[in-house]
Structures are given as C-alpha cells and as structure tokens.
Amino acid sequence: MRRLAPILVALLALAAAGARGQTGAPGEVVYDPFVPTPHRIVEQMLALAEVGPGDLVVDLGSGDGRIVIAAAQQFGARALGVDIDRSLVAEARERAARAGVAGRTRFVARDFFATDLRDATVLTLYLLPETNRKLLPKILAEMKPGTRVVAHRFALGDWPPDRQLMVDAAEDWSATAATRWVYLWYVPAQIGGEWEVTREGGVAFRLDFAQAYQNLGGKATNGTATETLDRGVLRGSEIRFIVPGAAPFAGDYAGRVDGDTMSGDLNGGARWRAVRRKTR
C-alpha cells in the first residue's frame, strides 16, 4: 500500500487523538495532535541530551507519559510531563505508577505557554513546527545557559541545532519515511553588546558582539586597531572566539560566561577577563 501523504497523516492523527489547545499570543489558540513518539526514538532523544540523575526533564505535550517515564526509569532523572488533556495526564500517572517511578515523576494538566521552564535542565518536544516556533522566545528567556532542548522530527524555528541525529522511525505507524531527525540545542548565554576586555601581558580592548543564537560575530578594537572576530561560538556558557590579524590583542580566546562577566584562557595560556558595558 502506498504511504499516506504527510498532511493526510497529520489530519487523521488529529481526528483520532483530538486536538490539544494551547494559548500562544493573547487571544490565540495553538492546536497540536497527540501522536506518540516511538519508544526507540524516546531513548535516543534522552541519550542525545545526555540525561542523568541530576536532571529535571520537562516534556511539553507529554501524552501517555512515555518520555517522562523513560527519563526516570532508564536514566535516573526527575521528570515533569505537561499536557492540556486531563485524560492523558491521568493515563500517564497510572503508567508511571505501574513502572515504579511515581516518586520521580509528576504530570500536570496545563497550557504549555503557562509552564515555568526555569528549573528545567532538559526540555523534550514533539510538537508541530508552528508551536515550536512560538515556544522559542519562552525557551530562550526562561531556560538557563547550558540547559538542553531536544526535539523529535520538527526543529525550533530558525535556531540551528548544535547536534542532530537520524533515527529509525519504523515503529511509528504514521511514518512517511523510514527515518526521522532528532535535534539537540544548548541554550546559549546572552552576550550581544559591548564588553571591556583585559588580558595578562597585553593591552585592553573592547569587544562588540553580534549574536545569533550560539553563533557570534562582531569586532574587537582598542581605538587604533580593529579586527573582525572569527569562529565565534557559544555552547551554553562556554565561549570561544578568535581575534585574527596582527593587532596587539589578537589571539584564540576560550572561557566561560558568568552573567555580566566572562573569563578564560588566551592561546591556552595567559588569562583574560571581560566585563559587560552595554547590552544590544
């Protein structure tokens, strides 16, 4: 039998499972169908995010609870499932009790957009692309630098993933292809703007960072020499950028962001430190 077109599959799933309404912008309702993530993909999502006993995993659109239960049972984490469908929340609680992980899991009937993400260390998603796009500003505003977001099948707007993995989707009856993508992001520190830098044995200079998620551009200058930054990147709070050329402040800078300060090693040796002066 020929495979169903993706849009028809989505409509059938919506009719079979019922639409789950979430509020996005004021007066707007976002609908997502309940389509379970195959168990094999659940395991690969959690492994890709390197979930462990110290994590709090939050699953938005938790459905029957399989991601939350796997996070607790197989990876030792604490986990919270959020779904607006009360019948699915009740089912998930029963499944968690049968799996013996009721003490490390919690399920609540709540709107995604009203869910506080500040304590989450890992966020898991299997939502439609438009819902992911609407959640993106909330994720970046609430989740701490270095926390992880992992999504099955659909990306997060224009935020490029830090890692992606092709996985087997054969277990999913609605699959229109034999494989699916799983995406991983590290929430980046927000550093766009001006910073003053001091370094051991060298001149002070100013950095003006232009940030696009984890990717950094911008310029370094001390008033007499100016260089365009090269290979600037963030992984959570970890930063690295290169000031090329012959300027007295040129070098390979690696370090860590801590709020309005950052510091680290220059060329693997001397120390450097920066203080935020202006936010863009």
Image (tube, rainbow, N blue to C red):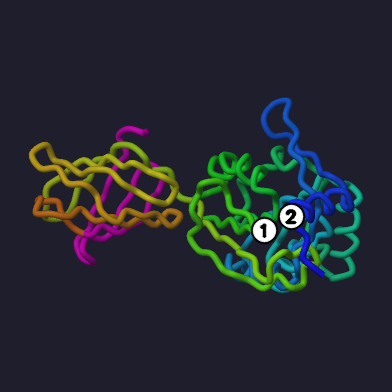
Q: In which quarter of the image is residue 223?
A: top left
Residue drawn at x 65%, y 59% is 153
x, y percent for residue 207: 25, 42
x, y percent for residue 8: 79, 53
Of residues 241 and 28, the one nearer the viewer is 28
Kindly report the secondary structure that dominates the magenta region of the rendered protein: strand
Q: Mark 2 points at which residue?
A: 80
Image-based side of 40 in relation to 165, left or right: right
Residue drawn at x 43%, y 43% is 190
x, y percent for residue 9: 79, 56
Image-based side of 168 in relation to 221, left or right: right
Instruction: Identify the element where label 1 is drawn.
Output: strand
Under mark 1, the amino acid is Val
Question: What quarter of the picture does the C terminus occupy?
Answer: top left
The range drawn in magenta is 252-280
Residue 32 appears in the figure: yes
Q: Is 72 in the magenta?
A: no
Count of marks overlaid on the render: 2
Q: How crowded is mark 2: few (under 14 residues within 10 Å), some or many (20 or more)?
A: many
Examine the rendered structure and indicate whether residue 212 appears above or below residue 101. above
The answer to whether the residue labelled 1 contacts the one labelled 2, judged by CB atoms less than 8 Å apart, is yes
Q: Mark 1 points at which residue?
A: 57
x, y percent for residue 192: 37, 40
Residue drawn at x 23%, y 54% is 272
Question: What quarter of the picture does the N terminus occupy?
Answer: bottom right
Under mark 2, the amino acid is Leu
Of residues 29 and 97, the one nearer the viewer is 29
